[in-house]
Image (spheres, grey):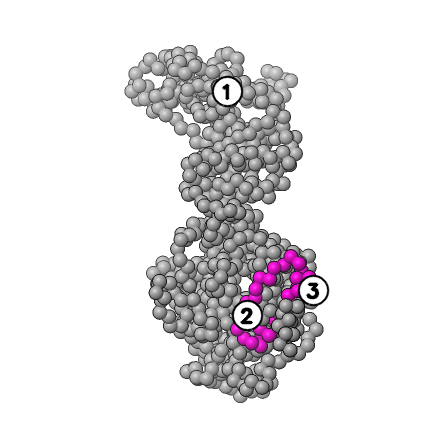
Amino acid sequence: MPLADALSFFPGLATCPAEPAEEAAALRSLAEWCCRYSPWTAPDGTDGVRIEITGSAHLWGGETALAADLAARLDRRQIAGRIAIADTLGAAWATARFAEGKSPIILPPGEIRAALAPLPVEALRLAPATTQGLRRVGLKRIGDLAAMPRDALASRFGEMVARRLDQAQGDLPEPLSPLGEAPTRRVRLSFAEPIADPADLLRATERLVEDLVPRLAQEGSGARRLDLGFHRVDGRVERIRLGTARPSRDPRHLTALFKERLDTIDPGLGIEDVILAAFAVEPLAAEQIGLTGHPVGNGANGIAPLLDRLGNRLGLDAVSRLEPRESHIPERASVHVPISVAPAKAGAQRQPALVLGSLDPSPDGRPLRAVPGIRGDDEIRPPRPIRLFEPPEPVEAFWLLPDDPPFRFAWRRRRHRVTRADGPERIAEEWWRPEGSGAADAIRDYYRVEDEEGRRFWLFRAGLHGGDQPPRWFVHGVFS
Amino acid sequence: MVEEKTRLPELRERIRRIERPTAAGHGVLPFGIAAIDRALPGGGLARGALHEILGMGGDEEDGAVAAAFAAGILGRLTTQESSAGDGTVLWCLPRPDLYGPGLAAHGLDPSRLVLVRAPRDAEILWAMEEGLRAPGIAAVVGEVGTLPAVASRRLQLAAERSGIAAFLLRRWRDGGQAARERNLPNAAVTRWRIAALPSQPPSIPSPAPTLTLPRLRGREWEGVGWGAGVGRARWRVELLRCRGGEPACWEVEKADATGHVSLPSALADRPAASVPAERFRRAS
């Protein structure tokens, strides 16, 4: 009915504009709050929340107690709602909206068909056109529908009717896709009185971590991603998300990582639940610790706590290793690999990346260590700078002949006069890569130049002379 | 006489223990060149201490020569056969412009590095301090512009306690910051300044032809010419400040693939009577 008609019927009607975006956000935050009962929670349409409580009802003392707890909390937050618990999603939906009776309604297991039969056909989540069609032929209750043959229903009213009926009665499965990612392990701590003191929050965190670690140890795994959620009394959820470089189940380390971020939590009027969820659990073998409690043997394992601390404060992409790659393009020959990507096996021997003169391997097969005094063979391999700019910085260069290095160039507002130069070293694009092949800038001629002060630069000319575009000069790196 | 000679190191050790009772001597890393090792107390670069390395001229912005000097030292540190030789090197920097093959050319195996990128100096200093307290780290390097004296003192204390060598490379974004920060005192045990020098022309001329043009009248171009190829790169290494030593200055050839700097052959071949390196007092 349009608003004008409604106002004409009832002049004192209170109206307010609908705000669908805000309402959707509010519903989402309500669904997040309902995560305290079970992680399998999702908003349902525009006015409901569905919660899968199969594995978690016993933690609350049974379905009745859970429903009562939910009703009490909704009441405290002044949210009017109806609660229904049933074997299937469809039946719960139908019961919550259309059944008569005081909320919460709990359907005993196995009695769905009898409970659904008296409900109207609108309770099957069908389109309004379909329900109108059903009513016109006289099918007003779900019980009537259930009695009809399925193929007749499908041919007349479409697939959906039969499917919804089967889902509601439990003959077809209907999975629930949760709001966030489903965690592998979850531990919860609830408080009778809401807490707000940072010391109490820290103690709660420690308790939860100590609770989680034995479960991880039992299955021989460690967590890579952890999510600590603080549920406030006003319904908001504050989270701390943590990632580790290697799977970890060391309670001190994890507590220390959480403790660093604990001051970002705003408890508001109080926290009533704290939930620790572990995602991305990976196998982690037991480790031998020494007398001091640190793992025996440093190696990649020894610095993992340090890398976690650095990564969690600066971002897990900020901590990286340099790994060589097979490529003659300079910027692709050495890449930054974030530490969160699986590193090389801890037992692999470190092979030095440089060839040190002429060496015969020692009897046990490992390359010899560098002998002081022997000059390395930096003349054999083309020299590479110690600083490489990505992307290369353009310079203004002056040259005499087409194949010459520049005799003068200007870079970063400074002018440099070249006294010595080496080159050219031609590096062209890799022909097997589809992108960039055939571009005029694909061919680079690198020159190692030294200016009058003694600074040495790695310049290159991109593109060849004689093309339709003049070639451009860049500084790619600085030598020492 | 002989007694007095042997008593001198003993006395030094006693004085050091009185001055800093908690610091254990963590050993030194010698450069391998007698002239440099003589100027440093203990005969080498102290481990378990904070060292500061500056660049000069345009290198204050790029930090290439300073990084190469540090890479040479770290290369020698990590190839030593000791417990410190097995750890990782933590290198904290604001921009990811360190190049692996370039480090390898100076003796530092890039697979021993862990790079930490942080845009702010305070975060780099924090990361360095965390690294100095962790087990399994062989050395810590940080590239900072602003260095509060308090932070440098904390780094020095952390380095002393753990025996890990810490290096600060100073890189400044602009002249103003450089002018402000260059002369501020801090708690580093040694302070170095490395400048790139024109290289010695190679003994075998490169096949490229040399080209010179006469001076063009009225223009600023002089005898334009790029001569023979780039020879062995040279550095001027200045020890500006050293706790327990005197400032000095040397001209060396850059670190080779084993990380050792060496004296240029012309200077090294002089007879032993003359002093190969110039020493002069410099106000630090």
Q: Position of residue A88 (x, y in %)?
A: 41, 21
Q: Which mark is residue B185?
A: 3
SS class, disc 2: loop
* Residue B271 shows in this picture: yes
Mark 2 or mark 3, which is nearer to you? Answer: 2
Q: Position of residue A87 (x, y in %)?
A: 41, 20
- Residue displayed at 63% across by 61% down: B145
Residue A474 visible here: no
**Could you give the CA–CA distance between mark 1 and mark 3, rounded to whole angstroms?**
67 Å
Disc 2 crowd rating (10 Å Cα; few below 14, some 14-19, many 20+) is some
Q: Is residue B24 magenta?
A: yes
Identify residue type, mark 2: Pro
Q: Chain of mark 3?
A: B
Mark 1 and mark 3, same subunit? no
Residue wearing tag 2: B30
Looking at the picture, which amino acid does disc 3 mark? Pro
Of residues B243 and A291, the one nearer the viewer is A291
Residue B78 in percent (x, y) is at 49, 63
How would you rate the neighbour count of disc 1 (Cα within 10 Å): few for under 14, some for 14-19, many for 20 or more?
A: few
State the CA–CA distance, disc 2 to disc 3. 25 Å
Name the one closer to the observer, A14 or A433: A433
Judging from the image, mark 1 belongs to the subunit labelled A
Q: Specify the segment rendered in magenta.
A: B13-41
